Amino acid sequence: MKLGKILLVLIVVLFTLPAMAQTGVTVTGRIVERGNNLPVEQATVRLLTGKDSTLVGGVVSSANGNFTLKNIKAGSYLLHVTFVGFEPTYQPLQITGKVNPVKIGNIELTDGAIQLGEAVVVGKANEVVVRNDTVEYNADSYKVTEGSVLEDLLKKMPGVEIASDGKVTVNGKEIKKIMIDGKEFFSDDPKVASKNLPAKMVDKVQVLDKKSDMAMMTGFDDGNEETVINLTVKPGMKQGWFGNAFAGYGSEKRYEGNAMVNRFINNDQFTFMGGLNNTNNMGFSDLASTMFAGMGGGGRGGFGRFGSGNGITSSGNAGLNFSKEFNKKMTLGGNARYSHSDNDAESISKTQNIFQNDSSSYYNESNISRTKSDNVGLNLRMEWKPDTLTSIIFTPDMSYSRNNTFENVDFETLDDTQNRVNKGISEYRSNGEGVNLSGRLEFSRKLNNAGRVFSASLSGGLEDTYNTGINYSNTEYFQSSNPSEVIDQKFRYDNTGFNYRAYVSWVEPIGRNNFIQATYSFSQRNQESLKNSYILGEDGAYSVLDTAYSQSYKNHFINQRASLSFKAQREKYNYTIGLNVDPSYTKSINFVGDIHLNELKRSVVNLSPMAQFNYIFNKQTNLRINYSGQTSQPSMTQLQPVADVSDPLVTVIGNPDLNPRYTNNLFLRFQKFIPEKQTAFMVFANGSYVINDIVSYTTYQGTSGKRLTTYKNVDGNYNGNLRAIINTPLKNKKFSVNSMTMLSYSNNKGFINSDENTSKSFTVMERAGIDFRSNVADFGLNGNIRYNNVTNSFQAQNNRRTYNYGAGATTTLYLPLNFKIESDINFSTNSGYSAGYEQEEWLWNASASKTFLKNNQGTIRFKVYDILQQRSNISRNVTASSITDSQYNTLNSYVMVHFIYRFSIFKGGATQSDAQMGPGRGRGGHMGPPPGHF
């Protein structure tokens, strides 16, 4: 019996010893991208012996970037991580056997050159990469001149368009914010970054659809998603001070100067900037352009066109932006800014109004204006996480604006036979001030680990603006019994109001990875608008109230929303469906002085469905489809049956029988990136169909050229847009090509003289380019063509086909002794426009520069703008009832000499050039953190 027990013990020991000898520790880690911590899928992880680099084992990273190496014995090792388009990473690893499992944490991969052994093989970094919902552009792939700002860099990227007023759109969607390393930069004013940030500091430009703070808290889309740009700063520039300053002066008394100082330490950011110029580079958005919009005193012309982006603008600005992470629980950020602008604009325009029975009228206008504005803004953002389950965000905002406008207009109306119907002049002057205060407090708490979340928010605001001025016009009629009409007024427009909104949300998990959200919100807005016009009295002062041109309103709005949504989350896809119920109440009182004119009350209940579907093929390929139905109420101006005769040629009266507008919106996006070919392919499509659209209903009165405009509901207005973008290198990696194709179609109905006209517009555009880059020279060639066909149910002979053609080339030569020559030339022409508005221009800029001083911190540059003196500014606008061609004054040719200075003070005394190499980068690639002992 004892012998049997002994034998049994021996057998167990003999079988257990080999197993024990084979047992080692488990090593885990996660592969992420440097700068954004996005996981890298399918990265190769190899474990090598430290002595002779013999392969011990290897795995590939999972979809979330994680990897696991099992049964690793004690010893010295070297982790080798590689992935296409990134530098290989080596990380020493010491295993003692005392800790199991060994958790390495994040291992960062950096885009750039791939170096293997003694032979250096340079792998070209991807120009465009798709990762989940993010499109990422590699900034170094797009060459810009010395001293260039972010806007110059964005213009070279496929799918990016920048309007004359500085508005940035990417793949047809307007950019609402620009962030730096995930932190807000001057809040909701993307122009600050695009017009001021030096392009040299940018490593990656990431375009993504950012959910609102509340949507991030609840996990459900609340319809407030914004398309934003996130900039990642070049490696090594987050550990000290860096900045740049430039100054330039040239012919035609042109000048510009700008300075920026940045301090980035880990997650803390501090930026100060300021500048002056008269070269149309307004570095901040003009708050007055929206604050005083619609607060003119009447008359002719485009009153309220503050900061329109046309003409020539002199501006100055100063701003401070910061983000401070006190600890993992508390972050405070914000900005303060001041800007001044002075815009001189001159324009001529020609409008053809299309009538039934092959007849038309023509309206011609010449306009001279000057607008000055001052803007002050303050925004703060506090994020507090008292524990891992609770989030609190508080964002107060304040803005102040002051505006001064002067405008002179000459106008005339012609009949179908080009005979003059009327002509006139107008003069407008105004001064205004306004202040806005607002704030938002948001709270969210996770109630369990399964996904139950309670969230709430409270927001509100106050506004107080006024505008006062003089309005004068003299209109002469040639085919009417009334030979002339004179308006001579002084006006004052006061607008005050307050609003608040309360919101609650409950998210409840049901089953596995399924969630239901129920929300309720209540909002109220009160507004009082007082518009009083005065004419000359017997005392020679503007003291008599002109009741025909004075109108005041008191508006009271109550809106509620109750919603129920369902969301399902799966490994490869997710979808959300929901329904909103929106009861609303409106009360509006219209009066002049003490005389009550009209009172309007409306109670409406609207339904708004939504659906969203996302399919993730892999990290580089995804599909997104969104549908939403949205109801919008007519404005009080569109509803009030009280005539507005402030324009001598246009009388506007509302229609109280208008129904709400209902818009069906559909959006589709497909994105694919092929790493082995470094090819990015993207398709974007969107469309809308409107039920009960609200359109103008215009009737021309007799032979005076006057118009009576009201509003009417119509069905059948719709539009669609399709864009396809591809970016890929050629077999020779020094060459790359990009292409963007766009198709759009719209069907719009309108009314002229009680007759319905349908205007159909079809547009197709192709833009393509090829680029070559080397250490000696960079060269780019691009071309574009745009075709637009407009047809009307009235007057087929007036259907218009227009063509716009363009081509361009950019060249950079890198010469010895740090000299550089740069040139860009663009040709554009068109056909099919009105006489005098056809265009053919060559726009050529060129510069020569030399860098000098220690570490090449200084650059002197000589640049010539518009060498051939052919720049023009022509635009066309087509509606269901008219076609308008316009031309504005613009900057002409000038020469400028710049001095550019860059500085940097990084941790340990490193220079900017040292920092941009990245820590530990050398022949063996990025070495990562120092050896660990586990």
Image (cartoon, rainbow, N blue to C red):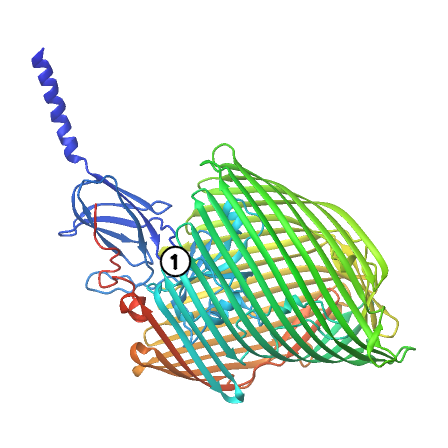
* Residue 540: x %, y % from top left: 84, 81
Question: How many marks do you count on the picture?
Answer: 1
User: Is the C terminus in the top left, top right, bottom left or bottom right quadrant?
Assistant: top left
Q: Secondary structure at mark 1?
A: loop
State the residue lying farthest toward the right.
481
* Residue 761: x %, y % from top left: 67, 63
Name the residue at 74% across, 62% down. 529
> As displayed, is residue 414 above or below residue 25?
below
* Residue 882: x %, y % from top left: 74, 69
> As displayed, is residue 603 above or below residue 300?
above
Residue 412 occupies quadrant: bottom right
Residue 911 occupies quadrant: bottom left
Name the residue at 50% across, 72% down. 318
User: Is the N terminus in the top left, top right, bottom left or bottom right quadrant?
Assistant: top left
Please state which of residues 191 and 315 is positioned toward the viewer in this rendering.
315
- Horizontal side of 761 relative to 44 (left or right) equals right
Please state which of residues 108 and 416 is positioned toward the viewer in this rendering.
108
Q: Amino acid at mark 1?
A: Asn
- Horizontal side of 718 relative to 269 (left or right) equals right
- The answer to whether residue 359 shows anywhere in this view is no
* Residue 791: x %, y % from top left: 71, 65
Where is mark 1, residue-wise? 267
Disc 1 crowd, CA 10 A, few/some/many (<14, 14-19, 20+): some
